[in-house]
């Protein structure tokens, strides 16, 4: 065997060990799997390496474990095969590492109603699993996020700015969500991994200003910043090359078949949040980009999941770098650095 082959084998072994370490964190820290619990790992050919790591880690805790491979042709929003759906609702814990998300399927909903704890990792790959946000200390992250509660309570006016040109103000329309911390230990609980963000519903009609998205859009790293003008809580203008053109096309497509009064709501500024995960990176991942520490993200379209009233067939999110986030007299983030302190 050549030195080059030995080197490649060493790198492969290092990756496998790092993936197993991350998988142990998922099984023992995030899901807190016990020896008497049944666990189902759902994976597919694209994410099989991650699935096998999760299987190996779970097998060291419980012998009541199954690994199921999804068909390679599975796509976003499609229900899993009936045998997978049936097994999901019969477990204590389900770990989903697939290319496309199963979070919004009936199979997942049925399992949650049966009290199954579920972690979903759509689009995860071996490298990000081993090195990115999955490797965070989730116990410490949970404690830090929970510690923000007193600062966020009873403060509602937000101002977001950046050197890139973001200048947006709005009022929060509900409580800040602090549960996206990676700890999923209650019956029926569900989490996406990697986790680690804080987010809120903007009060409908309250947002005014401009957002410069210079990080990623729906999990794709941007070559050119996107400028989004928001008036009365609705997007009124989107510019910035090919990505902006595609966003405008998606807005128009979502309006198809809607009555005019509802079609306008497709442009709703639906969600705002910022990342807290110190191990996450801006890599072009739909999940990891949202949780990378200090990044701010902006969601558009449907806001029903956060308690809003806009039920439209569209959800889009963009991530901005190095923003400053001020909540009345509190600096939450300063130029991309989480500070979370009263001025």
Image (tube, rainbow, N blue to C red):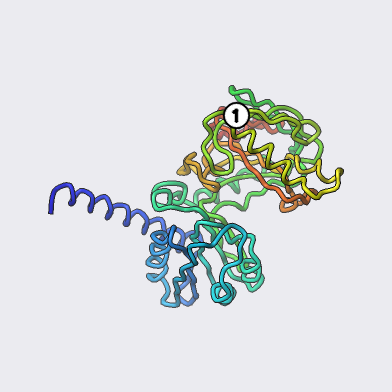
> Residue 286: percent from the left, percent from the top?
55, 47
User: Going 50% across and 49% down the picture, which residue do you hit?
Assistant: 140
83 versus 340 height, above or below: below
Q: Hey, which quadrant is residue 21 in on the image?
A: bottom left
89 versus 218 height, above or below: below
In depth, the one of 26 and 210 nearer the eye is 210
Q: Is 75 on the left-hand or right-hand side of 256? A: left
Q: Is 160 on the left-hand or right-hand side of 195? A: right
User: Going 49% across and 66% down the picture, which residue do you hit?
Assistant: 71
Q: Secondary structure at mark 1?
A: helix
> Residue 301: percent from the left, percent from the top?
72, 45
Asked if residue 329 shows in the view, the reply is: no
User: Going 47% across and 47% down the picture, which residue do you hit?
Assistant: 133
> Residue 101: percent from the left, percent from the top?
57, 58
Residue at which label 1 appears? 241
61 versus 30 height, above or below: below
> Residue 211: percent from the left, percent from the top?
66, 30
Quadrant for the C terminus in the image:
top right
């Amino acid at each position: 065997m050549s030195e080059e082959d030995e080197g490649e084998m060493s790198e492969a072994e290092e990756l496998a060990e790092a993936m197993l370490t991350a998988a142990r964190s998922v099984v023992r820290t995030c899901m807190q799997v016990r020896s008497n619990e049944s666990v189902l790992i759902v994976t597919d050919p694209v994410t099989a390496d991650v699935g096998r790591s999760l299987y190996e880690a779970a097998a060291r805790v419980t012998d009541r474990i199954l690994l199921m491979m999804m068909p390679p042709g599975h796509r976003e929003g499609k229900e899993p095969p009936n045998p997978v759906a049936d097994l999901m609702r019969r477990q204590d814990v389900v770990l989903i590492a697939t290319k496309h998300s199963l979070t919004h399927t009936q199979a997942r909903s049925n399992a949650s109603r049966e009290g199954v704890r579920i972690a979903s990792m759509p689009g995860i790959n071996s490298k990000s699993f081993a090195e990115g946000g999955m490797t965070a200390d989730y116990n410490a992250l949970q404690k830090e996020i929970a510690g923000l509660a007193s600062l966020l309570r009873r403060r509602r006016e937000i101002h977001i700015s950046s050197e890139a040109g973001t200048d947006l103000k709005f009022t929060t329309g509900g409580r800040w969500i602090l549960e996206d911390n990676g700890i999923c230990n209650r019956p029926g609980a569900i989490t996406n991994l990697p986790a680690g963000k804080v987010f809120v519903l903007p009060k409908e009609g309250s947002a005014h200003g401009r957002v410069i998205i210079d990080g990623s859009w729906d999990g794709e790293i941007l070559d050119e910043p996107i400028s989004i003008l928001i008036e009365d809580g609705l997007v009124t203008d989107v510019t910035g090359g090919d990505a902006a053109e595609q966003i405008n096309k998606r807005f128009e497509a979502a309006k198809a078949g809607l009555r005019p009064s509802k079609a306008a709501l497709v442009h709703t500024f639906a969600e705002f949040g910022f990342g807290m995960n110190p191990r996450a990176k801006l890599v072009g991942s739909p999940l990891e980009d949202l949780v990378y520490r200090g990044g701010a993200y902006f969601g558009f379209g449907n806001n029903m999941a956060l308690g809003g009233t806009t039920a439209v067939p569209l959800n889009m999110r963009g991530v901005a770098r190095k923003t400053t986030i001020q909540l009345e007299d509190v600096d939450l983030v300063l130029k991309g650095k989480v500070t979370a302190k009263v001025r």
